[in-house]
Amino acid sequence: MASIGGLFISTAALAATLSSTAYIHAFSPSLTIAPQSKSSTSTLFNRAERRKKKKKKARSFVIDDDSDDTSASGTTITKAEPILLGGGEAGYDYEVGESKIPVATSTSKDVKKAPSKLDQELSGKRIEEEGVIGESVTSPASVSDMPLEPGQIQPDVSTVTTDPETGIARIQQGKYVMDKVTGKAVILSSLGPEYRLAQMFPGVPEEVRAQYRFDWNTVTVEEMVDKLREACTVPLKNAEGKEWLGIPPHPQISNPAVDFVLANRDHLGHRMKKTLGRLKLRAQSQFQKKEALEYRQLWKHFMLLEDHISAPFRQMLLNAEGKIGPNFGNLDVATYCNGELYERTASYLVMKSMVAHWEKKYQDAKDLEEIPDSDFMQQLYTGDPKRYLPDPPIIFRLDEVSRIVIMAQKMCKAFVDTPELFDDLPPEVRFIESALSIQGGTALRQFTLEEFCPANNIDPASLREGLKRLYQQMFNMQIDPYGDLTMTLWNLCEATSVGTDDARDPYEEYIANVEGTDYASNPGFFQTYTFDHDKNSLVRFLDSAKSIDGSTATNPEEVSRQIKGEALELFGFNFGRQDSSDNAKKEETKTYKVPEDRAIGRPHMMGWLELLGDDEELGVDGEDKEESFEADKWEEVKA
């Protein structure tokens, strides 16, 4: 018996088939055929014949010269090899031309399986699948890390660019942090490691500190804002020789402003940012356009100062990420974390942030395991929402997260247990490690006063100031993965300040709405209002969404039908309503009635958000508007 093309036939039948026609086909170059009866038929021959008639093509065959002797003596005939055509039929390469079936060049054992997301993270790499860039153990899954086009290399410097698909401006993360003042990569000092440490934790000389420092026991927010504006205001002169006092045009800064911010860094930071933003909105909501523009200019300038001051710190942590990430799982931390003091400090902060971040993800994963499926809303706002993406670029399952968090803890412990790496770090940095093992605020304050401060030859007030300065630097880092450690730092600042002068917080009445909800009683209040949202807007859809009708929703299909019906109405589909076109136009032009549970008594369409118009983007209105945004036409007047 022989098997050809999946058919089992005897050798005698095969020979009979070949000798029953003038056309001789050889299935193998080494096949010898013996003569048989011409009356024999073959299924394989019939298929070939049918194919010949269907295609209506003339076939040409090359037959050996001694083919006449084949039936008598048996000769090895060299012919074309059979191939599969698809559909289970056998044919020949001269019938179909070049084969459409790819030829295997390797076995399945030779193909390397793509590493899983967990394997990529454990190796210290970013998750990357089909061009989508995900998280790593030290870096977030951020839109800023995605290339604008597939295969595009990461730019040298972080910059703001326009997405070609959406037309929306976004940050594109580069290899180096950009100093917004110069528009170029941050330059770390070339004068030595001590100067780089000073860039990491900047300060000012004692005489400058004495000139600008707040008296925190008595200072008010109004005084802080006035002093900040005064420090930022310098004599300016344009190319035509005109002189005036003002805040330098963006993105320029002055030395007095930098000195002022550094002298009060522990009391400014993000709480001053929030306060300036609320004061701007407060003036705008009272239709005080000039005052709103002035607050906007000061707010923008202060954020520029914060970005400029924190840029070297961010660059140092970015450098540390580049060392720790690829070495994830390597407990010989001295081989890649050793270096100058500023480098080891950055490495510790990256490691501690990594631990805090993955511990939070571990807790979220545990909570999701325990939340019942019926409580969908609880599940929805627990953990990272990126897990709902079709192919999430993150690790979020409990068994996988647990492996990463355990290794992160081991790496951080190995760093702390290595004296040459940890023991000479700044006191406020080492305090984090000790403080987080103490339960309760009273015990923490007792440890600070009786043990840590005496052992490190530092007074408690200086330690609290150092913690707050570190907090302000960390607050300028991205939330993921630094947000969890940053909030821990804030809690330590609050806990160690209890019972001291530092516990006073003049910002609270401006940013916490604790004094009331009107202009007279709340200095940070501004009146919000409702809008005439477009008929097909998502807001209006949610306002008009009905509860599922329990009397008709008797099964999941009916529930789905009701939800889909409302969703389709959002896009303008009318489900059988007989409203005339006139009624529809009338409905569209009348004022939109906001549901009371969302309006909660607020006014409708006040319009103050549009008060500034183009000045919201351009800056202060007035005769100096043009000069104030031509940075190449001004200079600071020298005293």
Image: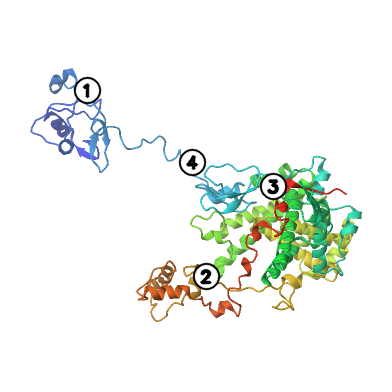
Q: Residues within 10 Å of mark 3 (few under 14, many from 20)?
A: many
Q: Which residue is mark 1?
A: 76
Q: Which residue is mark 4?
A: 112
Q: Is residue 412 visible?
A: no
What's the amino acid at mark 4? Answer: Lys
Vertical comparison of 53 with 69: above or below: below
Q: Residue furthest left?
A: 39
Q: In the rendered structure, which disc, 4 or 2, sits on the residue that comes first in sequence?
A: 4
Q: Residues within 10 Å of mark 2 (few under 14, many from 20)?
A: some
Q: Residue furthest bottom?
A: 551
What's the amino acid at mark 1? Answer: Thr
Foreground mark, 2 or 1, reads 2
Foreground mark, 4 or 2, reads 2
What's the amino acid at mark 2? Answer: His
Distance from label 4 to label 2 (Cα)? 54 Å
Is disc 4 placed on a helix, strand or loop?
Answer: loop
Which label was assigned to residue 591? none
Distance from label 2 to label 1 (Cα)? 86 Å
Q: Which residue is mark 3?
A: 178
In the image: residue 369, left or right of residue 358: left
Count the marks: 4
Q: Which residue is mark 2?
A: 533
Is disc 3 placed on a helix, strand or loop?
Answer: strand
Please report the residue visible at 17 percent of the width from the left and 30 percent of the height from the top: 58
Distance from label 1 to label 3 (Cα)? 77 Å
What's the amino acid at mark 3? Answer: Met
Q: In the rendered structure, which disc, 1 or 3, sits on the residue that comes first in sequence?
A: 1
Distance from label 2 to label 3 (Cα)? 39 Å
Q: Are marks 1 and 4 in contact (CB under 8 Å)?
A: no
Q: Are marks 4 and 3 in contact (CB under 8 Å)?
A: no
Q: In the rendered structure, which disc, 2 or 1, sits on the residue that comes first in sequence?
A: 1
Q: Are marks 2 and 1 in contact (CB under 8 Å)?
A: no
